Structures are given as C-alpha cells and as structure tokens.
C-alpha cells in the first residue's frame, strides 16, 4: 500500500509540467506531506498505539453488592463500585435475579465514578431498561463543564425490554480526571434497569470500508495544529467561529486522482468536532473538482439524522426545488480511518447550474451576530437581550467575485431587496418569490418534516436573474436525533393561528405566505399531490435499493441504525387525514398574520450591551452613485455618528454629530451625504465609547427590485380582452413596458406590429400565439433600437409562433434584472415556424430558450450581434433553419437534449454548433460554410453527427473541458466532409472523437485556455 501510494504521488508530481505553478504547496510542503504518507502508511505511531491499548470495560447487573461500602460490585471482579443499592429489586430482571427499580423518589441508578479520564476519551454506556409511563436516560456528568444524556434505543425485544446507549467524547478542554455515569428516570412511572455497561477508551476505532471508493486527506503537522487550535477555541466558547484565514493546505486522494485543496473545521456548535471525527469544509484549488464540485463539506451522518436528510434531498431534487447535492463517503485522514461521512455541496454556482438554473447570487441572513451573542452568553452568563434577527445583515456567498462584477453586484442588490421585503413583510410574496416553487417547498417540508431548514439562519435563497425573483434552497432539514420540532403541528398549515400573536419575528416571517390566496391554492394542491399514497409508494420503491445499500454502509460504523421505511408514509397519511382542516386553517393563519401586521407585538431590548456585541447592532451601507452612506441603528440606545475614514487615512469628523435614536425593533435609518470619495468605515459613539464599523459596499436592502420598479411603471394597452383571450390586432408603438399576467391566451393577429421604443419591453406570463401568414407576418421590432426584448416567463401552455419577424430588439437591462437575449422563453414551451430573427441589438443572444421544450422549424437567424440561438437546459428540435452572419456562435446549447437537422450555418464568427454542460446533440444533414470551429463538444457533452459538411473552418472538430467540475467530452461523427479547413481536430486529454468508427483520443492540454484567449 505504501509503495502504491508513493508511486502514485511520484507519477502525479512528475506528470505535471506546471505543477509548482498550479499548486499552492511549496516543494518543502510537498516533501512534508510525502513524509506524512510514509509515516501514516508505513508504521504505527507509538502514541496512537498506547491510546488504542487503553481500554476498560465495567459491567454491573445488580446481582452482587458489598455491604461494607453499600454498593453494587462490578460483575467481572474489578474494584469499581456502583451506587444506588436501594434501587435493587427482585420484581423483574433482564438477566439473573435482580435489577434496579427507579421511581420518581429514587430516579438515579448504577451511579459510578470513572477515573483516569483524559481529554478526547471515548465513552460508550449502555443498559437494558423496562419502562412504565416514563423515559429512561443514560447520563455522563462532569459538572458544569460536561453533561451528556441519551435515550437512544438500539435494541428492543417483544417483552418490552429496550437497550439504550450513550456514546460521547470527553471535551478537549476538560481538565478533571474523573466523571460520574448513571441511569436516570424521567417521568411519573417506574423504570427497571439491568446490565449497566461502561466502555472507556482513549480513542474510538472506526471501520475500514472496502466496498466503495473513499476520500483520503493528507495534511501536515502545521495544518493539523491550526485545526487543533481552532477546535480548542471553539470548546472554550461553545461556538465554532469560522473565518477565511482558517483554511489550511491539504491534499485529497479519491483512489484515482490527487487534488490540491484547502480545508478548515465546519459547523456552528461543537457537536461537529467531538472526538477525532471532525467536520470539514473543503475548497479545491483551480483545475480540480470532486464529484463535480469545487467546494463541499463533510460531516458525521448523525448530524443530519442519517438517511432522512439524503432522502429529503432526493425528493426536493425530483420536484425541482433547489437543494445541495448530498451523499456518503468513507474518509481517512493521514492514513487513519475516520469512518463514514456525509458529504454536501457548498453554496456556489455549481449548485445552481447542476439544478439547471442560470448563475445568480445565493443570499442569506448573516448569522455571525447571532452566534456572537451565543458566545458572549456562554462567556459572561448573561442572555444579552438584543435584536439579533432584525439586525442580521443580508449577505451573499462568494462576495469577493460579486463585488468585482457589476452585473453580479446589481443582482445581489436586487436579491437583498427581495429578502428584506420578506423579512419586513412589506411586499406580497408573489412579487418576492417564484410562488410555485415556494409552495412546493413548503409542501415538501411538511411531507419530509425537514423543519430545521426553516430556522432563519439556515435559510438560503437563489436570486433568479431571469425572473428577478427568489427561490428557496432546501438545506439542513434535520438535527441529531431526527425531526426538529419547529411548531406545535407537524404541518405548518395546521399551526394554531393563536401562535402567531406570540411568535418572534423570525417565526412570524414564515407565516406571511398564508396571507396570499394564490400561494394557499398552490400549497394545498401540492400537499394533496405529495401526500397521495401512490406518489409516496412510488417514491419509496424507487429509492429503496439505494436506501438499502447506504444503510448497510452506515451500519458498518453504526450497527443499530435502520432507516424507518414508514416515516414518509406516516407523514403523508397525516396530511391526507387532515387536508380539510389544513384548507380551513391556512385562511385563518393569513387573517391572523394580517392582524398582527396591523397591531404588531411590542418588543423591548436591553440597553446594556457589551463591546463585543454593539458593533453588530449598527450597520453602514453605501449608495455609490449618490455619495451617500446609510447608517442603521438596531441598538436600544441612542448612537452618535462622529465621522468616517478610509483605510490609510485619518478620521474625518462631521461638522455636527449625526444622531440616531434608539431602536424598539425596527432599524432607525439616517442618510449622510459626503463631499468626497466613499470611505471604508465610520466611527460612532454609544455609551461614551467610540467604535468603528466597516461600510457594506452596497445599498441598505429593502427597496424595490428592478422588476418591481418596471411593473409599477408599466403600461396597460387598449387591447381587446374577451374572457381569457387577449387579442393584439393592428400596429402599436409602445414606450412603456407591458406585463401580461398568467391566465390569458395572448393572440397576435396576422399583420400586427409591435414597435418597442423608449426602452420598453414585452413581458408575458401567459402563452402567446402569433398567427402571421407569409404575406402578412407579425412583426416585433424596435425602431429606435432601445427595446428590452420580447419575453415569455413560465407560461402554463405551449406558445405557437408562426411567420413572425423579430428585428432590432435588445435584452432586459435593468439593474440586477438582465437577460442575455432579445427574445427569451423561460419555462415556457414554444414552437417557432417560419420565423426570422434579425439584427438583435447589443446582446449576447438573438433567441434564448431556457428550461423548456421547443421546435424551431424553417427559421432564419441573420446578422445577430453575438450568438444566434442559445438554449439552456432544454429539449427540442431545430429543423430546416438557416444561420447567417452570427457575431459569435450559431447554435450554443448547454445542458440540453436537442435534434438538429437539415440546417445551414454561414459566416459564423466562432462555433457553428456547440454543446456544453452535459448536453446531447444529435446533428444530421447539416452544412457549415465558414466558421472558426465547426463542431464543439465540451464539459461531459456528447455531440453525435451523421452527415455533415464543414467548409472554411479554422478547426473542424474540438472536444475539451471548459469547466473542471464537469469532465471530458465526446464527438461521434459519421459521413464527415471537410473542405478548406485548417485543422481537422483539437482534442483535450480525456476527451475523444470517433470518426466512422475509428476512435481518436485527445492529447492536448489546457485546450480551453487556448481556444478562449
């Protein structure tokens, strides 16, 4: 094994020409890691051996007691004494004649002192119990510094006896040399306890897994020392605070490839870093990916209730709700097994793109201040009554890349505005969220009872740049031990409306959805659908092979684990049985919520705040275009703004202090104009003490989103409406946006014209039927070339467009609401017959179809600014169409399954046909006449071609990786004709090309960099 790993590392190092440039490690660092591999795989470490050899087992069955010490004797004869002899009973026993009978007057049994305890020791305690109207616990008690309880049942027999178990690790900062262990009765009945057993070891040994590929981590002493220091700090405060600078170098090996990465501890509370099995956040360096991810976390399966979390993720994924990818993998650290881990994708663009969405920011309520309050409470013993929810900032993931990109910055600003509207209940939820996905999410949380994701600081949201709306991201549904009891009812729609009056704002926020009639209709419909017995049975039957396989894997480390096959069925049955009550109750919840808005609950917070907390109650933002800083006070006391400064400059004082009164819940806001460039921070005074806080480089959230601004100023044209039919007939020149809601059929009569001027756009959530004829086509154009496009979003029926000319149109360009195309169909199936797309203005695509099924037949794309036709995550057919003079690609499809036949591409400035991001393109009888690249396949795509002629191309066929989280691509070609083409093919290592049955493997390196320079 040592020789194999060493040879792999040597081959890896020698095969990478630019290794030292690509990797963050120095030569010395690499050698130190190689030394770690030699040590961990080649020999045993004496200290670890001694830890393993320390193993003590104590057993007491109440059969023998010592009259002198008045205690039970240890069964195997060791000099350990168990107390509570007065509980001894002959009434019933699991083994032998005696057991311990615990009652409310004698609630403790088998108390024993365990000595020679050291930090990070492993304890496993078990006992057989028989209960009557009570609950039994096992307890490990080390005083104020240590207290564990467990009622976990690992075995049950037909007579009612149960075996309960407690496993724990002594905290690393525990300095006492002994602890107390005992059984405890909770309840008014009785409990019989027998065969009380304590296992005490220096460490826990984890199984080795040979059945599936694992993940090996190699870290040097310096990296491990940094993790250890951070872990000790977390145990001293009770909270694991994480920072970017905590990441340390690590090498990953998955059985095939070594990967350069960084890692740190992961989690909020210390349950993630108990014993040797720590949770990690892992970031791979550029050029590396694992399971198609660049950043991911690993944690013990216990933390999310084993397979319940995995099953919930599968269900959310099936129902098109955004969720992190989730799985299980054995993990080793420096050659030592850490057992089975759950892995989970982090919140990066790969999460979004893997779920067939366009990249957009992921935002959240920042929980930093919440956990700082917990730390201060732990350190000082005070609860610190501060407004931690309302004062929580709204922040994006990957803030660095967002601040460096103006489009992403605008998207983040729009997303933050929407999320603040949700927190403040200042806008109907159908103008904040994609309502259909929100209703599905709520209904699925009820089915799976994944309630922990409803906790405000666990909530994550995706800003969809096409719809300019938020979507929820399902995440962190369970806690150790199972379902998180969030509300009084297992279904949120059955919550007692009286609970709203006493709800905290973070809980109240969740109920505002029920004040929206459209949400209620959708939510109820999805509850009926998801609770249907057939739906649940089919779901379980489909997942059961994987559940059985993963259960077996988990049981290698957790022998008592069994997935509850009835869990979802029981939940669904409850919903079915109460659907009429839910239907009635959600209306009451909406009424109660509206009543609370009119008469909000009075709240008060303490003015006494220590230095570590006060800076979390005051925020500063910037309006960069107006040279204005916005300061918001959530502190209960008055604050005084003294001045501002840039990083390397001195403090600039205001002529007069700016005063912000104390807050009683809602933030107190002041805007301050500045005469010079924007500062980095401001100074404020509270209680006679001065503080500096950084200025957030974006405006204070809470304003209107770009879409809401457009909707509020839109035009209602004088078009004919008859029932659900909206008829557009004639010639219309518009200078304001038109928004058509769902529920209509929008018909353009033959010969009709729509001239979009003055920056106006056409937006419809209803299907459109454009009934042009050859001599009377429908025309949509922009005479002043300022339009914001023709857009159809989430229409419920298939649009049919024939004999229509789209000319001179532009894309949506409004703050964070920007699309790349002049004509956009999003989640709206469509057919284009004999249509023309001509001369789109200053935008990436003439036509962009997203998450839809389409037919493009007999169409012309001509003189397009960049790409002619871009399809993302679609199925469809492109037939008998012409692409002339495209400024970039003629056809660029990502994540799509499309048939392309009998098409011609002429004078294409980049790729004639491009398939990316796991696309399958079936190309037949096509001709390329002038292009940089004839056919391109990238990122796990397969382009299959039968009968194609490529003339006057620089590259005929190329296949490569552009995004490392995907993988190699393929092209299969039969009946290929190349003429006047400079280079036949370019294929990256791992990608390949098959021509008339002959396989050609790639030999090029870093091909994407060369093609996209």
Image (spheres, helix red, strand yellow):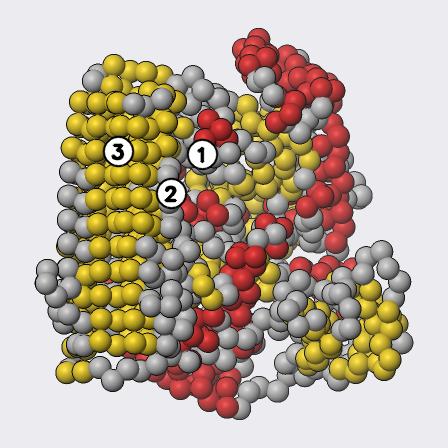
Q: Earlier in the sequence, mark 2 or mark 3?
A: 2
The residue positioned 63% from the left and 37% from the top of the image is 263
What is the C-alpha distance between the residues marked 2 and 1? 17 Å
Q: Residue at x 49, y 28 (%)?
A: 1010
Closer to the camera, 378 or 698? Answer: 698
**Residue 659 location, x and y as percent?**
79, 83
Q: Which residue is mark 1?
A: 962
Disc 1 versus disc 3: nearer the observer: 3
Disc 1 and disc 3: Cα gap in Å?
25 Å
Q: Quadrant of residue 725?
A: bottom left
Residue depth check, mark 2 versus mark 3: number of the one nearer the observer: 3
Q: Secondary structure at mark 3?
A: strand
Q: Residues within 10 Å of mark 1 (few under 14, many from 20)?
A: many
Evaluate whether residue 40 shows in this view: no
Image location of residue 520, percent across then percent down:
32, 75
Name the disc covering residue 888, or none.
2
* Neighbours of disc 2 within 10 Å: few (<14), some (14-19), many (20+): many
Quarter residue 605 falls in? bottom right
The residue under the point 87% across, 73% down is: 653
781 left or right, relative to 667: left
Disc 3: which residue: 929
């Amino acid at each position: 094994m040592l020789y194999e790993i060493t040879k792999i590392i040597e081959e890896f190092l020698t095969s990478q020409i630019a290794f030292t440039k690509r990797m963050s490690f120095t030569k010395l660092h690499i050698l130190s890691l190689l030394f770690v591999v030699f040590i961990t795989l080649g020999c045993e470490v004496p200290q670890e051996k001694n830890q393993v050899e320390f193993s003590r087992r104590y057993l007491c069955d109440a059969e023998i007691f010592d009259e002198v010490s008045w205690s039970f004797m240890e069964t195997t004869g060791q000099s350990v004494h168990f107390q509570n002899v007065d509980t001894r009973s002959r009434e019933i026993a699991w083994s032998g004649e005696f057991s311990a009978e615990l009652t409310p007057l004698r609630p403790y049994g088998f108390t024993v002192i365990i000595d020679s305890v050291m930090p990070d020791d492993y304890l496993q305690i078990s006992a057989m119990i028989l209960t009557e109207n009570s609950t039994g616990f096992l307890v490990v008690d080390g005083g104020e510094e240590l207290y564990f309880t467990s009622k976990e049942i690992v075995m049950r027999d037909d007579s009612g006896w149960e075996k309960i178990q407690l496993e724990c690790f002594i905290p690393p900062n525990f300095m006492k040399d002994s602890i107390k262990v005992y059984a405890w009765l909770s309840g008014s009945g009785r409990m019989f306890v027998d065969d009380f057993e304590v296992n005490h070891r220096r460490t826990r040994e984890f199984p080795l897994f040979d059945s599936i590929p694992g993940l090996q981590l190699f870290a040097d002493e310096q990296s491990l020392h940094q993790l250890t220091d951070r872990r000790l700090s977390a145990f001293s405060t009770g909270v694991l605070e994480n920072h970017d600078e905590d990441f340390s170098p690590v090498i990953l090996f998955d059985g095939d490839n070594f990967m350069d990465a960084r890692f740190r501890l992961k989690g909020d509370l210390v349950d993630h870093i108990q014993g040797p099995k720590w949770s990690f956040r892992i970031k791979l360096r550029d050029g590396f990916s694992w399971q198609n991810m660049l950043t991911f976390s690993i944690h013990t399966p216990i933390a999310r209730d084993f397979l319940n979390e995995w099953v919930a993720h599968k269900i959310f994924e099936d129902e098109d709700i955004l969720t992190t990818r989730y799985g299980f993998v054995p993990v080793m650290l420096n050659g030592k097994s850490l057992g089975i881990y759950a892995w989970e994708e982090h919140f990066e663009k790969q999460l979004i793109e893997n779920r067939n969405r366009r990249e957009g920011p992921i935002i959240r309520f920042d929980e930093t201040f919440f956990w700082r309050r917990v730390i201060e409470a732990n350190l000082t013993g005070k609860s610190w009554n501060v407004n931690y929810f309302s004062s929580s900032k709204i922040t994006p993931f990957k803030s660095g890349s967002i601040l460096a990109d103006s489009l992403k910055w605008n998207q983040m600003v729009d997303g933050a505005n929407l999320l603040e509207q949700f927190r403040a209940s200042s806008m109907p939820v159908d103008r904040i969220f994609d309502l259909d996905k929100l209703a599905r999410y709520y209904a699925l949380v009820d089915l799976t009872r994944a309630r922990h994701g409803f906790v405000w600081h666990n909530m994550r949201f995706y800003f969809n740049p096409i719809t300019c709306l938020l979507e929820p991201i399902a995440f962190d549904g369970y806690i150790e031990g199972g379902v998180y009891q969030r509300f009084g009812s297992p279904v949120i729609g059955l919550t007692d409306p009286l609970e709203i009056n006493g709800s905290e704002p973070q809980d109240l926020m969740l109920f505002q959805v029920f004040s929206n009639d459209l949400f209620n209709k959708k939510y109820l419909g999805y509850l009926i659908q998801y609770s249907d017995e057939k739906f649940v049975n089919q779901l379980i039957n489909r997942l059961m092979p994987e559940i059985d396989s993963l259960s077996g894997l988990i049981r290698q480390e957790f022998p008592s684990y069994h997935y509850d096959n009835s869990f979802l069925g029981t939940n669904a049955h409850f919903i079915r049985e109460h659907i009429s009550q839910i239907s009635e109750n959600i209306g009451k919840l909406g009424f109660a919520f509206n009543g609370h808005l009119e008469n909000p609950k009075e709240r008060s917070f303490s003015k006494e705040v220590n230095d570590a907390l006060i800076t979390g109650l005051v925020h500063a933002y910037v309006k960069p275009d107006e040279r204005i800083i916005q300061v918001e006070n959530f502190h209960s006391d008055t604050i005084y703004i003294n001045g501002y400064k840039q990083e390397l400059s001195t403090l600039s004082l205001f002529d007069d202090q700016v005063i912000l009164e104390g807050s009683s819940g809602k933030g107190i806001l002041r805007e301050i104009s500045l005469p010079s460039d924007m500062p980095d921070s401001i100074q404020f005074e509270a209680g006679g003490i001065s503080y500096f806080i950084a200025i957030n480089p974006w405006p204070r959230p809470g304003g209107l989103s770009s879409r809401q601004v457009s909707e509020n100023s839109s035009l209602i044209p004088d078009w004919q409406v008859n029932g659900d039919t909206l008829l557009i007939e004639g010639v219309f020149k518009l200078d304001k946006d038109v928004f058509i809601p769902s529920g209509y059929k929008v018909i353009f009569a033959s010969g009709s014209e729509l001239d979009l001027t003055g920056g106006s756009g056409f937006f419809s959530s209803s299907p459109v039927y454009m009934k042009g004829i050859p001599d009377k086509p429908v025309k949509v154009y922009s005479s002043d070339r300022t339009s914001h496009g023709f857009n159809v979003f989430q229409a419920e029926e298939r649009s049919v467009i024939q004999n229509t000319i789209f000319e001179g149109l532009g894309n949506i360009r409004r703050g964070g609401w920007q699309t790349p195309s002049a004509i956009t169909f999003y989640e709206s199936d469509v057919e284009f017959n004999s249509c023309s797309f001509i001369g789109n203005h200053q935008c990436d695509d003439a036509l962009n179809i997203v998450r839809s099924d389409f037919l493009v037949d007999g169409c012309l794309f001509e003189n397009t600014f960049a790409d002619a036709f871009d399809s993302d995550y679609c199925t469809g057919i492109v037939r008998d169409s012409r692409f002339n003079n495209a400024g970039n690609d003629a056809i660029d499809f990502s994540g799509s399954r499309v048939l392309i036949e009998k098409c011609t591409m002429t004078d294409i400035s980049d790729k004639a046909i491009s398939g990316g991001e796991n696309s399958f393109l079936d190309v037949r009888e096509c001709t390329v006449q002038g292009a940089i690249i004839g056919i391109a396949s990238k990122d796990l795509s397969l382009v299959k071609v039968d009968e194609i002629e490529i003339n006057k191309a620089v590259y005929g066929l190329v296949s490569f990786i552009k995004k490392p989280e995907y993988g190699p691509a393929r092209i299969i070609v039969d009946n290929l004709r190349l003429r006047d083409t400079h280079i036949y093919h370019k294929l990256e290592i791992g990608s390949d090309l098959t021509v008339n049955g002959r396989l050609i493997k790639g030999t090029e390196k870093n091909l994407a960099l060369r093609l996209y320079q």
